[in-house]
Image (cartoon, rainbow, N blue to C red):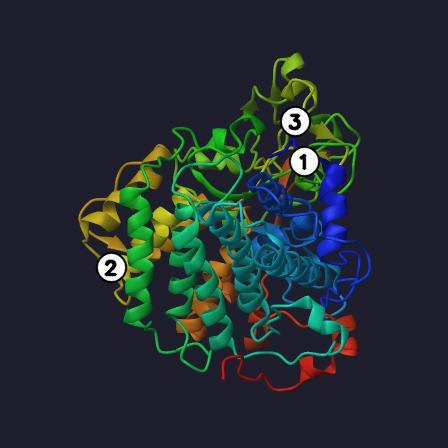
Amino acid sequence: MKNINIAFIALFILVVAAGCKKSFLERTPLDAVTIDNFYQTENDLRQVTGALYGSPWFDYNDKVILFIGDAMSGNLGGGNAGSWNNFAVSSGETGVNEGWRSLYRIIAHCNMNIIYFNEKASASIPAEAKNAALGELKFLRATAYFNLVQLWGAVPIIEDNRTLVEMPSRPRNNIADIYRFVINDMRFAAENLRTVKDAGRVNKWSAEGMLAKIYLTRSGLKDDGTGTGNGTRSQLYLDSAKYYAGDVCKNSGLELMPSYADLFKIANNNSDESLFALQWVGSATYGIGNSTQAYYAAEPKLTGVGDGWGAANTVSIDLFSNKYISGDTRRKATYMQSGDVYPELLKASGGYTVTNTTPNLKKYIVGTPADNDNKGVFFMSTGINTYMLRLADVYLLYAEAICGNNASTTDADALTYFNRVHTRAGLNPKTGTLTMAEILAERRIELAFEGQYWFDLLRQYDINPAQTIAMLANQDRGTVSYNSTTNTTVYTSKKVAPTAASFKLPYPEADVVTNPLLKEAPVPYYK
């Protein structure tokens, strides 16, 4: 997939949506180009869908994913975390604007391709191939809307961006209707995507894994879209989450990678454990590579290309001090500590040894061009995929769905799949009883700095708002740093109490100006 012609991608994206527009109302220029010669073969469909796993997500990956997933949740402290870590995000925040814009750009691409697939695709393309391609588009569109509804709540549902020419302002739609739309799209994907692994693309198991997460999230909401707030979830939705996660766990034939650390090496992109990942091309061309290393590598010599500005971006005191069990191999693969040796970094010098006590990030730090056979590492660009859904995530979702409305479970399946994740990290298996608190703690450690933990906390807030606020208020979100003058570790403590308003992002100020209906009450989408 990474060999897709970049010029074709750029032309196609111009056709399906005006990607450079600043508003989420991505209008399609009706006279820009003729599209009747597209969609003539199955390969044409695959080229179109393949282009949507990378660059349309760039701003979300570059500006948003770790700030939302890990700074707001209290995993990431210092550096650029700033307002996110302090629950002080404003409507003018770059990440707010770029996150909203990126997700609606993805939706626009998917919308127009879905329409054109149905209107323009050659009748000679087998129905199974066409539906599989539509399944990819609906998977991606559903994922974008799922992120939007979790982060912002009620948002406009747009299915045909051509209609925005005559009606550019759109009201927000009810949260329950957005979930209905997301579930419909994702179920279509699950029913029509292929079961076989197709490197870099989603398949049936990807869709079922995402359905498990969607249903688990929906289980904590009432029909009006607000959280239950009473400590319970809908058993109907819990059962659906359990069904889809269980099918992936038991019937996909997929396995975890033996080594957790190996997940975060370019050579292991698109392993069996990867159910959905953003696909990046390490390149001198801006916007098609993964920029994470540039921002989070502890020092420039680790990258060898002039970036590596992450010295101040550290693990929070809360995560650093309290959350890793002794012997957990995930710690070293997630963040660095004094004395750690990484033979895969600075290979030509015999490896990289950490000599100070600042806990800088390791995850997604892949090293220099030479460390990667002179492939896939450039200034602000590497070829390491961004995980959006891993098999380990689904294993833990399965355990969470089984535990459901209980504080603990003795269910054999919950223990089995929890332990597959837990023991890979070099830890002893849990026996007898597994608590919900242990499942949630495992998710935090397993998925740290993959942009996931805030979404877990949002699920908890929906059912236990007071408890979630109290937990976050008690976190030490401060930083751990190294003072080279005194050769000491410095702990700079910080606690910040969120409010109910902290659990939804503000709408981007520019979009509120161009679409005043964002300030109005949401309306039904389904009549």
- Image quadrant holding the N terminus, namely top right
Per the image, label 3 sits on a secondary structure element best described as loop
Disc 2 residue type (three-letter): Ser
| Front-most of residues 173 and 368 | 173
Residue placed furthest toward the bottom: 521
Disc 1 from disc 2: Cα separation = 39 Å
Q: What residue sits right under mark 1 in the picture? A: 297
Disc 3 residue type (three-letter): Gly
Left or right, 286 with reference to 105 = right
Q: At which x and y percent is residue 8?
A: 73, 40
Q: At which x and y percent is residue 250?
A: 27, 44
When the figure is inspected, residue 202 is found, relative to residue 366, above or below; the finding is below
Count the numbered circles shown: 3
Query: What residue is at 48 percent from the left and 36 percent from the top?
Result: 198
| Front-most of residues 93 and 135 | 135
Residue placed furthest toward the front: 124
Q: At which x and y percent is residue 382?
A: 68, 33
Left or right, 182 with reference to 407 = right
The crowding category of the residue bearing disc 1, from other C-alpha atoms within 10 Å (few below 14, some 14 to 19, many at least 20), is many
Residue 359 shows up from this direction: no
When the figure is inspected, residue 180 is found, relative to residue 192, above or below; the finding is below
Disc 1 from disc 3: Cα separation = 9 Å
Q: What residue sits right under mark 3 in the picture? A: 367
Q: What residue sits right under mark 2 in the picture? A: 408
Disc 1 residue type (three-letter): Ala
- Give the mark, 1 or 2, whose residue is nearer the N terminus: 1
The crowding category of the residue bearing disc 2, from other C-alpha atoms within 10 Å (few below 14, some 14 to 19, many at least 20), is some
